Structures are given as structure tokens and as C-alpha cells.
Image: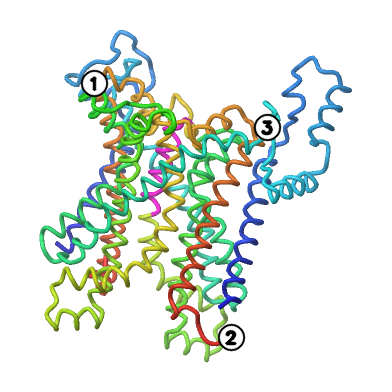
Amino acid sequence: MIRRVGARLGILAASLLAASVLIFVVCSALPGDVASVILGEGATPDQLATLRHQLGTDRPLPVQYLSWASGMLQGDFGRSYLSGDSVASLLGPRLAVTFWLVTFSLILALLVALPTGMYAALRRRHWDGFIATALAQIGMAIPAFWAGLLLVAVFAVGLHWLPANGYVPFAEDPGSWAAHLVLPVLALGLIQGAMLTRYVRSAFIDVLNEDYFRTARAVGWTQGRAMVRHGLRNASLSLVTVLGLQLSSVLVGAIVIESVFALPGLGTMLLQVVTQHDLQVVQGTVMFLVAVVLVVNALVDVSYLIIDPRLRGERE
Amino acid sequence: MKRFTLVVGLVLVCSVVLTALVSLVWTPFDPIRVVAADALLKPGWPHLLGTDAFGIDIVSRLMIGAQTTLQVGIIAVSIAAVVGVPLGVLAGQGSGWVSEVVMRASDVVYAFPALLLAILFAAAFGGSTWTAMAAIGIATIPAFARVARAGTLHVMASDYVLAARSCGTSRMGIAVRHVMPNIAPLIGVQASVAFATAILAEAGLSFLGLGTRPPTPTWGRMLRDAQNLLFGDPLQSLWPGLAIALAVLGFNLLGDGLRDYLDPQLREVS
């Protein structure tokens, strides 16, 4: 088992390496001279050469990659050529906003998807089960940012119940912090919940066909009780994987939702540096996001090996 | 009921395709020319859904938007299928390590959601329809590789492949004569679902201002413009979003319907 965990972590390391090379190659693909952009038209060749040397852009690409990658291993994601700020110092304060948005959205998605998906599975041959499935199908088709716009139109513009956009840190005013997060979380969580509902439904339909489920019913358990006692546990295994895989789509959804609600998170920052062509920061931020996805999925796999004895495989 | 999904999906997809085709030759008004005097007209006649802030007819813009949507979908899905399917078949047919390398590589790409890859491309090369299509296409390769691999493994375990192998048919021959025709329906289903995802990703990109550049109207771009008018004219946000949702719903239902139609065993499961 330790060997298996080790192997999985080895794959994680290889994936991180491959992802970082990919990101670096894309960001260095276009020949462009940062030094001449910073210094402008009137720079002398001497000034340019000095700045290039300072920035390190006069080194060959593989050397630049290695210095970026080794920096990341020590927690240094690089430094903006334009503003001089380190990527880590740019990410830090924005991390909390995105973290809360993503976490609450995932929780809401689960709260929506579990009951809806279970109901849709149990009642799959009835009209009400069909309606639950159809609702999920419709939710999947709605872009989260459009849902956000509609929610703002109704609850902020129409009813004046909640703020239309902006953010207040928790430490400053917890009530206002929560109020500003309600609509973004609703938009992202409900749409994500619709996607998740489909997985929950098919996971539970699998359970319904199992022998232990039939046995539980045969000894007189109600469907609902058998579903919660046996179904939930067995289905949760495949659901944890799906939840891990959903993380990347929630993160991406958060980038767009932040832009709808003007939340000062990672996504807003990423879009800002993309328009400014601050490639160092783009490179560091994208690497950070991809690393989060890869690490979480590796953790999901490892937690499986620990939880489920069946996966530990034959004696090694 | 069994055919219901397929029929609704087909109707929705066909109406998007038809709209795009019609818009090639005719739209009720000029979809690009600014008419300041007609700005922000309410829905009515002759502008059925009203006009936007530039006085351009919304119906006309929506119709042209269908073109971009389909174009991005077709190219992105083609890139993904052309690269992903052979890789998947190779992984399914090949020895252990070939399969391992292909699948691990696809795991790495899988960690880049379409939109994030497109943002990266937009940062490096400047956002355009092309970076959007390329990024969405590349990000979708793993999905096709997985489906193709799973299908191939299934086919390779069958008796007729064993028979072909004992006759000395080459791997390539088996791939072309037995594997491809048998996994084609699976790929078709995957293509339909991937199309829906591509539409969503393109809409998101255009909404962020990193996709197709103005003045070409796209549904995502229209939502971006409508966001500024949310307080004055919230109806503007309704139509483009509705168009995106109906198109995505259409392709998703078409995919589901096709799968149920092609594989009766799966009807129960999803």
C-alpha cells in the first residue's frame, strides 16, 4: 500500500513537471522583448542590455525555465516584470476570496445534488423523477455567469435585497461579507449542483441494482432508509472522485463569476494581468491553479487507497 | 419517452444550424452597423427583441452569433477527435507502457480546463476566435482519448478480433476494420457532448473579452455588453443567455439521446 501511495505521488510530481513545462513553453512561445516594453522607445542598447541582464531574460530559455521551476519549489512563483511585485504577494491577498467562493459553491452543489440525484434515481420511472432529471439537464446548459446576471437582475436590481457586486473582507464586517457572497455562490453552486446531480443519479442507480440493496428491501427496510444507510456509503466512493474532478470546473467557473460580481479574487487578477500582458504573473497564477487541481486529485486517489481495502490490490 | 430526448435534442440543434445557415445570406437588419438613433429600443416591430446600446437589431446579432458558436464548436471538436481518437485507440491496443504514457499525458492536459488554457493562450498570443478554438480543442483531447481507449479495450476483448489476429491481420488492420467502426457511435455521442462544453467555454471566453473580437457578434460578447445595462435594461441579458442555454441543451440532449438509441443497455443508467 505504501508503494501504491508512493507511485501515485510520483505520478503527481511528473504531472506537475509536465504542466509547468507546458505553461512555460506557451508563455515563451512568442518572441517579445520585455526590456524594450518596459523602457519604451527611447532606450539605448546599453540600457536594454543592462535591464535584460537584471531580469534574466538574456539567458537561454531552458535556464530561464529551470530558475522559474526551482523558485516554485521554494514557494517563489516568480516576479512581475512590469510592477516588480512577486507573484506570491499578488496571489496571497486574493486567495481568500476565491477560496470562500469555491468552497461554499462546492458545498451548495453537494447540498443540491445529493437529494435531487437520489430522488431522481429512486423515482426514475415516474414523472417526478423525470422532472428532477430534466431540471438538472437544464441547469447544466445554463452558463454560470448568465445565472449570475439573472440573479443580480432579480435580487439586486429588482428587489434590492442583496448587493449587485463588490466584496467586503470578513474581518471588516462579517454580515456584509456574507451578503456579498450570496449571489456569486448561488450562481456557481446551483449550476455546479446540476452537473453533480447527474453523477449522483447514475451512482445511485448502480446501487439500486446491487444485491445488498435488494436484501435490505427484502427485510423490510424502506427505500429511503436503504438508500441512506447502504446507498450513500457505497455511492460516496465514486462521488469523491467526481467531486475532485469537479474542482477544476468550479475553479474555472469562479474566474468568470468573479468577473460578473467584481470580486477581487484570483480570477479577476488573472484577467487583469492577461490584458496587461504581464506574462510572468500569468505563468505563475496558471501554474498555481493547475497545481491545486493536480494535488487535490492526487489526494483523492490516495485517500481512496486508504479508505477502500478493495483498491489496495493483490499483495505486492 | 425513450425517443423524447433525442427528438428535442435534434430539434434544438437543427434550429441552431438553420439559424446560422440563414444568417449567412439574410438577417433582418445589419448586424454590425451602428444606428445611434435606434439605441435601446424595446422589443416590438420591426425590431422583434429590440436593439442594443448601439442601435443594432438584437435578432440579427443573435443569428450571426449562431455562426461563431457553430464554427468554434466544429473546429474545437474536430481537433479533439482527430488527435484524441487515434491516441485512445493506440492506448487501447498497445502494450502496458504505451497506454500508461498516453493516459498520464491526458491526465495532465485534463488538469487544464478549456477556459484556463484559453486564458493562457490569450495571454501569450492575444485572444481571438483561433486561440479559443485551439485551446478548447486541445483541452478536449483527453475526453476523446478516454472514450476511444475504453471502447477499444472492449472491442479488443471480443472473439472476432481474436479471429482476425489468428488470421494474421496487423494491428493497423484491426484498428481500421474492427475497432474504428465499433467505437464510432461512442465517438459520435462524445462529440455531441463535447460540442455543448465547447459552446459554454466559448461563451465564457467571449464574455471575458478574450474570445472572438468585436465587431463580430457572439452570444458571450452580447452578454458582456448587456451586463453594463443590467440596471437600466435587464431584458438585454435575457436573449443571448437563452440562446447559449438552448444550444447547449440541444447538444447535450442529442448526445444523451444518441447514446440511449444506440445502446439499449444504457437506457436505464443515465
Q: Is residue A46 above or below residue A267?
A: above
Q: Secondary structure at mark 1?
A: loop
The residue lying at 34 percent from left, 12 percent from top is B35
Label 3: chain? A
Range of residues picked out in magenta: B194-209
The residue lying at 18 percent from left, 55 percent from top is A132
Q: Provide the residue designation for mark 1.
A: B50
Q: Provide the residue designation for mark 3.
A: A80
Decide: few, some or many residues near mark 1? Use Cα within 10 Å; few <14, some 14-19, many ≥20.
Answer: many
Percent x, y for residue B229? 32, 20
Q: Quadrant of residue A196?
A: bottom left
Label 1: chain? B
Question: Can you tell which of label 3 and label 1 is closer to the viewer?
Answer: 3
Circle on res. A316? 2
Decide: few, some or many residues near mark 2? Use Cα within 10 Å; few <14, some 14-19, many ≥20.
Answer: few
Structural distance between the alpha carbons of marks 3 and 2: 48 Å
Q: Amino acid at mark 1?
A: Gly
Q: Secondary structure at mark 3?
A: loop
Decide: few, some or many residues near mark 3? Use Cα within 10 Å; few <14, some 14-19, many ≥20.
Answer: some
Percent x, y for residue B154? 42, 78
Point out the tag, 3 or 2, that comes first from the N-terminus: 3
- Farthest residue to the top: give it: B37
Q: Main secondary structure of the magenta part?
A: helix
For the N terminus of chain B, the quadrant is bottom left
